[in-house]
Amino acid sequence: MSCKTALITGIAGQDGSYLSELLLAKGYTVRGIVRRASYPHTERVDHLLRAHDERDPDCRFKLDYADLGDVSSLRNVVEQVRPDEVYNLASQSHVGISFITGESTLDFNAIGPFRLLDTLRRMGAPTRYYQASSSEMFGASPPPQNETTPFLPQSPYGVSKVAAFYLTRMHRVAYGMFAANGILFNHESPRRGINFVTRKITRGIASILTGEIRKLYLGNLDAKRDWGFSGDYVEAIWRILQQPEPDDFVIATGDTRTVREFLEETFSLLGLVWEDFVEVEDRYMRPAEVPALLGDASKARRVLAWEPKVRFKELCRMMLEGDLAAKGLTLEAARALGSTLRPGKK
Ligand code: GDD
């Protein structure tokens, strides 16, 4: 069992919650930073908060307030926690919305990591730093993409992640810090945010079945993504920080599917034809699109001994079952309900 301390930004997100579970199981003390909100969004880690009493001086799971836009809050938390490892998972993570909130996306996603890296550098402690880099950085570069593929970002989000990638690398090269990038391709789960396309679809199907909505409105159905399972990807994230030397790694499944294929697979699990329930709307089209992502993770396989376990069909089923369960439905009950549905009607 480890007695290390990890600090996670973005701990209340999908990856933050799975990574926390993984590190706690390994014996880490886990501290996470959250931003102040009038309605805290800690649903994904509430089970961990309940299991750990923060009044206990040896408490192994605790959240602190800090903000990637506020360097003094970062300094306070880093000085107090003295982490062995920092996982910077926090970001404005929605590509489409970054076209509307470009400036704050750049500030949070690019200057934010700089503030954190700079704080760690000034402290001079041998902290290991992980940067959540993204396949969105490859943008228009044709697939397959690996660590040597040129970055050609297509969105403010993509540009912000390229800046953070190079800032991380620069702290490694210039100051000798252990600063590493995981270039993660899309990764999903039942804990995925509700406005990413996979979760929007599985949650939408559950709401169609219960009659809350009649149709699902989507954008580009031709985009291809390499979709993996977040629970598998946090294992890779951890392994990246356990290497003898800091380095950058592509993490992907090596399988690419269109949004249309995701629709086909999930609707067909209930015996439904997606075309009866989906409409394409211009408002969900992006000013520039990343047409096709397909990761070549052979370096991660070789160096990290990492392999994804969950494949596309299992991921679709897992996500659909999660959203059905939230409505009190099993897959079998949902199939029966589905057979009573008329296309596009309640
Ligand atoms: N969100 C969304 N909503 N996307 C849609 C919709 C819709 O209604 N309709 C079609 N799409 C298309 C998008 O245009 C995109 O091509 C694809 O579905 C996937 O969109 P998202 O699920 O929003 O993910 P993303 O690929 O843009 O970004 C995700 O993956 C990146 C890694 O490549 C995010 O998780 C990023 O934070 C992450 O870095």
Image (cartoon, helix red, strand yellow):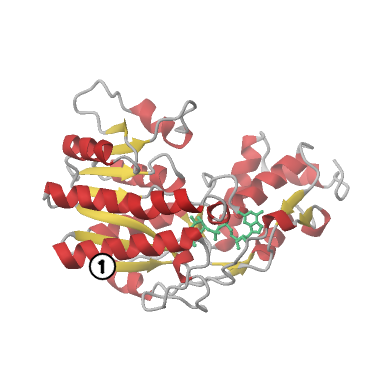
Q: Decide if residue 108 is on the left or right side of residue 267.
A: left
Q: Residue at x 49, y 78 (%)?
A: 144
Q: Residue at x 51, y 44 (%)?
A: 191
Q: Quadrant of the C terminus?
A: top right
Residue 52's x, y, as percent? 31, 27
Mark 1 Cα shell of 10 Å, populated few (<14), some (14-19), many (≥20): some
Amino acid type assigned to the residue bearing label 1 in the image = Asp
Where disc 1 sits, the SS reads loop
Query: Can you tell which quarter of the image residue 183 is in?
Result: bottom left
Farthest-out residue, top? 55
Residue 152's x, y, as percent? 47, 73
Between residues 222 and 104, which one lies in front from this camera angle? 104
Residue 332's x, y, as percent? 71, 44
- In the image, residue 25 sits, relative to residue 230, either above or below, namely above
Q: Residue at x 33, y 46 (%)?
A: 22
The quadrant of the rendered image in which ligand 1 is seen is: bottom right
Q: Which residue is mark 1?
A: 247
Between residues 38 and 342, which one lies in front from this camera angle? 38
